[in-house]
Image (spheres, rainbow, N blue to C red):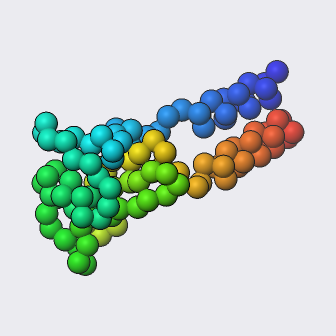
Amino acid sequence: MYRLLAVVAILGLYLQPANAAWQTTNCTTFSHNGKDLLVTDEATCRTACEGMGHTKEYKGRLPDYKKKCEGSECQCLIGENSYAGVCRDSTYCNGGNNMVFSGVVLASCLVYWFM
């Protein structure tokens, strides 16, 4: 009984949403201060960063624009290894979810087996 409860607790913690608010804002419908801006490339990501008040470049970079799968993500570099998020399309894939889920299932099985 306790083993099953432990497995359910581990899986439940994994399934909790951990996205920040900016990660649920689509780049195709991005709006800031009432101004609509379609973020589709590095230049429009820079415009979005500047519109949010991030204007200082770090090592010659300000926007961090990535396109994966069918979606895109825009963040602003605000310091050494520090980013402020702008938007992420719902169709953006980060490629790590399957590996994380496999690890969670493995951990759950081990807990079940050894308890």
Q: Residue furthest bottom?
A: 59
Image vertical order of residue 84 relative to residue 112, above or below: below
Q: How many marks?
A: 0
Residue 76 picture quarter: bottom left
Residue closer to the observer: 91 or 51: 91
User: Would residue 9 appear left or right of 115 to someone viewing this image?
Assistant: left
- Residue found 33% across the figure and 47% down from its top: 27
Q: Residue furthest right?
A: 113
Q: Residue furthest top?
A: 1
Residue closer to the observer: 22 or 14: 22
Residue 26 picture quarter: top left
Residue closer to the observer: 91 or 63: 91
User: Would residue 15 appear left or right of 21 to someone viewing this image?
Assistant: right
* Coordinates of residue 37 in the picture (x, y in percent): 21, 47
* Coordinates of residue 15 in the picture (x, y in percent): 59, 33
Image vertical order of residue 8 relative to residue 70, above or below: above
Image quarter (top left, top right, bottom left or bottom right) of the C terminus? top right
- Residue found 27% across the figure and 48% down from its top: 38
* Coordinates of residue 70 in the picture (x, y in percent): 49, 51
User: Would residue 45 appear left or right of 17 to someone viewing this image?
Assistant: left
* Coordinates of residue 92 in the picture (x, y in percent): 48, 49
- Asked whether residue 7 is in view, the answer is yes
- Residue found 70% across the figure and 49% down from its top: 103
- Asked whether residue 22 is in view, the answer is no
Image vertical order of residue 94 relative to residue 21, above or below: below
Image vertical order of residue 22 relative to residue 9, above or below: below
Image quarter (top left, top right, bottom left or bottom right) of the N terminus? top right
- Residue found 54% across the figure and 32% down from its top: 16
